[in-house]
Image (cartoon, rainbow, N blue to C red):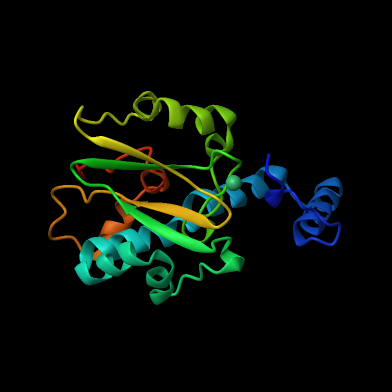
Amino acid sequence: MSDHDHHHHPDEPAIRAEALEGLLIEQGLLDPAAVDAVIATFNERIGPMNGARVVARAWSDPAFRARLLEDGSAAVAEIGIDSGPGGQMEKLVVVENTARVHNVVVCTLCSCYPWAVLGLPPRWYKSPEYRSRIVREPRAVLAEFGTRLADDTEVRVWDSSAEVRYLVLPRRPQGTEAWQEGELAELVTRDAMIGVEQIPEPA
Ligand code: FE
C-alpha cells in the first residue's frame, strides 16, 4: 500500500459520514442496503458517465479527439469536467485503442484511478492479483474479462500514479456510424475505459 491513499484525519468528511451513517443505522433510521445501493449507483453509473461523455464526444468530433489525445486534462475541462487536484487527477492521459493496439490501465503500486471521469475504482482494480497479473500476463487476464485479441494486436499496459492517470478511448463499435453523441455515450462502459473489455456491436 502506498501512503497517498491512507492519510486519514478524524475531521475528514469521510469519517464524519461514516459516523453519521453508523448512528442512523443504529437508530433504525437508515437501511444499510439503501446506503450500499446509493454508493453502487455512484460507482457504476454516475461516476463513469463523465468518461462516457468524453468517449462519445471523441468518437463524434475528430478535432476534440485530437485535442483529447494531445492533452487529456485540458480536453475534459472543455466539457466541464474538473480533473484538478479535487478530482484526484494531476494529469489525465488518454490512450486510444485501434485495430493494432489495445490499451489497459492498472496501478501496480496501489489503486490510482481517474476519479473525475470514472468514479470510484472497482474492487478488482485494487486487488493484488489484478495489479500483478495484468503486467505479467495481460492477455490471460483480458481473456478472463471476455476480451480476446488478435495475435498481432499489441497490448500496452499503463501504470497509473498519483501524478498521471489514464483513460482508455475504446474503439467505436461498427454499426453506430449514424448514432448521436448521447446514444453513443450509453454504449460506453467503465470496464472498456479501464481497457479490460471492448464495446460490442449493438444488437
Ligand atoms: Fe495508486
Report x, y in % for residue 157. 40, 39
Q: Residue at x 37, y 70 (%)?
A: 75
Q: Quadrant of the N terminus?
A: top right
Report x, y in % for residue 60. 21, 65
Q: How many marks?
A: 0
Using the image as rendered, state which of residue 113 and residue 159 is in the foreground.
Answer: 159
Within the image, what quadrant is residue 72 found in? Answer: bottom left
Res 75 seen here: yes
Q: Quadrant of the C terminus?
A: top left
Within the image, what quadrant is residue 128 found in? Answer: top right
Q: Residue at x 21, y 27 (%)?
A: 151
Report x, y in % for residue 71. 37, 67
Seen in the picture, residue 200 relative to 56 is either above or below; the reply is above
Seen in the picture, residue 135 relative to 75 is either above or below; the reply is above
Q: Residue at x 13, y 60 (%)?
A: 178
Res 200 seen here: no
Q: Residue at x 34, y 27 (%)?
A: 139
In the image: residue 68, left or right of residue 158: left
